[in-house]
């Protein structure tokens, strides 16, 4: 069974921004939440551009260090990179690996820490 369409659907439905980059730091995918979050910076128009162009020099240095750390070991797969108190969220960089464990890219994952406000099983009847 081809799972790629299922995995894409999982990421597309995530309410948090997910940006996937190649090892050359090229933005190769943004889920709808990421496109909306970064709309003022170009949204989907950022596809094919360098993630490094979207960050200050200090952040660029840290992104490069993280990718080198990911490459050092298949045990190095996720690192906490930023806390945004105003939005009550944490940001992580996560390694993407091929079936053999080789590093193929990385993604940025935002996780909000606010309690859910929706009612349980609210089908909107």
Image: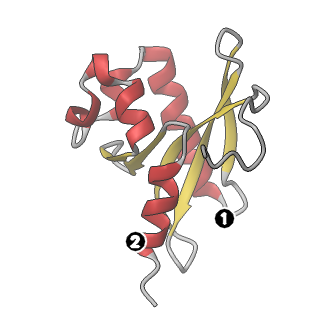
User: In the shown orientation, is residue 36 left or right of residue 62?
Assistant: left
Say above or below: 108 vs 82: below
Residue nearest the observer in this picture, 27 or 13: 13
Q: Residue 23 bears which disc, if any?
A: none
**Residue at x 62% of width, y 56% of height:** 72
- Closer to the camera: disc 1 or disc 2? 2
Label 1 to label 2: alpha-carbon separation:
25 Å
- Percent across and percent down for residue 11 are 49, 54
Which of the 4 image quarters holds residue 26? top left
Q: Residue furthest front?
A: 125
- Percent across and percent down for residue 65 are 55, 36
* Circle 1 crowding by C-alpha within 10 Å: few under 14, some 14–19, many from 20: some
- Percent across and percent down for residue 80 are 70, 34
User: In the shown orientation, is residue 74 left or right of residue 47?
Assistant: right
- Percent across and percent down for residue 117 are 74, 29
Q: Residue furthest bottom?
A: 1
Which of the 4 image quarters holds residue 122? top right
**Residue at x 42% of width, y 48% of height:** 20
Do the residues under discs 1 and 2 have CB atoms within 8 angstroms?
no
* Residue that carries the numbered disc 1 in the rendered image: 74
**Residue at x 35% of width, y 34% of height:** 35
Helix, strand, or loop for circle 1? loop
Q: Residue 5 bears which disc, if any?
A: 2
């Amino acid at each position: 069974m081809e799972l790629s369409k299922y995995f894409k659907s999982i990421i597309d439905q995530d309410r948090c921004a997910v940006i996937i980059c190649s090892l050359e730091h090229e933005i190769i995918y943004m889920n709808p939440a990421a496109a909306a979050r970064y709309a003022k910076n170009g949204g989907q128009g950022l596809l094919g551009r360098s993630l490094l162009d979207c960050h200050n020099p200090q952040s660029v240095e840290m992104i490069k260090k993280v990718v080198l750390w990911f490459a050092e070991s298949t045990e190095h797969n996720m690192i906490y990179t930023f806390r945004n108190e105003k939005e009550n969220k944490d940001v992580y960089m996560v390694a993407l690996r091929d079936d053999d464990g080789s590093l193929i890219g990385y993604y940025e994952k935002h996780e909000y820490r606010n309690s859910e406000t929706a009612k349980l099983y609210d089908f909107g009847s």
